[in-house]
Amino acid sequence: MPYQSSITRTYTFCAAHRLHTDQLTEDLNRKIFGKCNNLNGHGHNYTVLVTVQGELDPHTGLITDVDALDRLVKARIVDRFDHQHLNFDPAFAQVTTTGENLARLIWDLLVDQIPSGQLEKIGVIETRDNFFEYIGALQKPVVPSAIGSRRTDAH
Ligand code: NI
């Protein structure tokens, strides 16, 4: 049964990256990633949204310890990535520094450390036009395939 309440805290950091993978040719990198593949990389002002869901404490009405959450995100995310080049972070040695992968990495760095409640999702705003979300693996119930089934609400 999913919780009904959540809190989202917002954090920012600045970082550089270059979209590139050694597993593809230079031409394919250029074709897939366009100018984001430019050799020297480029920077973003990243905004990270950390959403924690849980039951309200009956006395405080709070889901989690916000100060502890802020300390956690500062220590594990902001201090690690702010004013860095993401491609040089060991976590990105084998994966591209896309917003998708960044959101997943941030999830992995936080999910076991949430003070109380549980991590519901990570949002990463990379640019005005790019927003990424990650909600974890195997968190959502598997929905049976609708193929071959008959909709009972269709008339
Ligand atoms: Ni970029």
Image (cartoon, grey):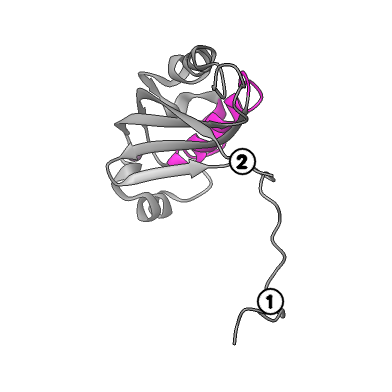
Quick check: 80 above or below 87? above
Going by the numbered disc 2, the residue's amino acid type is Gly
- Give the labeled residue for mark 2: 136
Query: Which quadrant of the rendered structure holds the C terminus?
Result: bottom right
Looking at the rendering, the quadrant in which ligand 1 lies is top left
Quick check: 55 above or below 146? above
Going by the numbered disc 1, the residue's amino acid type is Ile
Looking at the rendering, the stretch of residues picked out in magenta corresponds to 91-116
- In the rendered structure, the answer to whether residue 40 lies left or right of residue 151 reads left
Task: Reply yes or no: does residue 106 show up in magenta.
Answer: yes
**Quarter assignment of residue 151:** bottom right
- In the rendered structure, the answer to whether residue 145 lies left or right of residue 72 reads right
- Give the labeled residue for mark 1: 147
Q: Earlier in the sequence, mark 2 or mark 1?
A: 2
Pointer 1: residues within 10 angstroms few (<14), some, or many (20+)? few
Spot occupied by residue 60 in the image (x, y as percentages of width and height): 55, 17
Along the line of sight, which residue is nearer the eye, 152 or 40?
152
In the image, what residue occupies the spot 57% across and 42% down?
A: 135
Along the line of sight, which residue is nearer the eye, 4 or 129?
4
In the image, what residue occupies the spot 57% across and 40% down?
A: 4
Q: Is residue 21 visible?
A: no
Along the line of sight, which residue is nearer the eye, 4 or 59?
59
Q: Which mark is residue 16?
A: none
Q: Is residue 3 visible?
A: yes
Spot occupied by residue 27 in the image (x, y as percentages of width and height): 39, 53
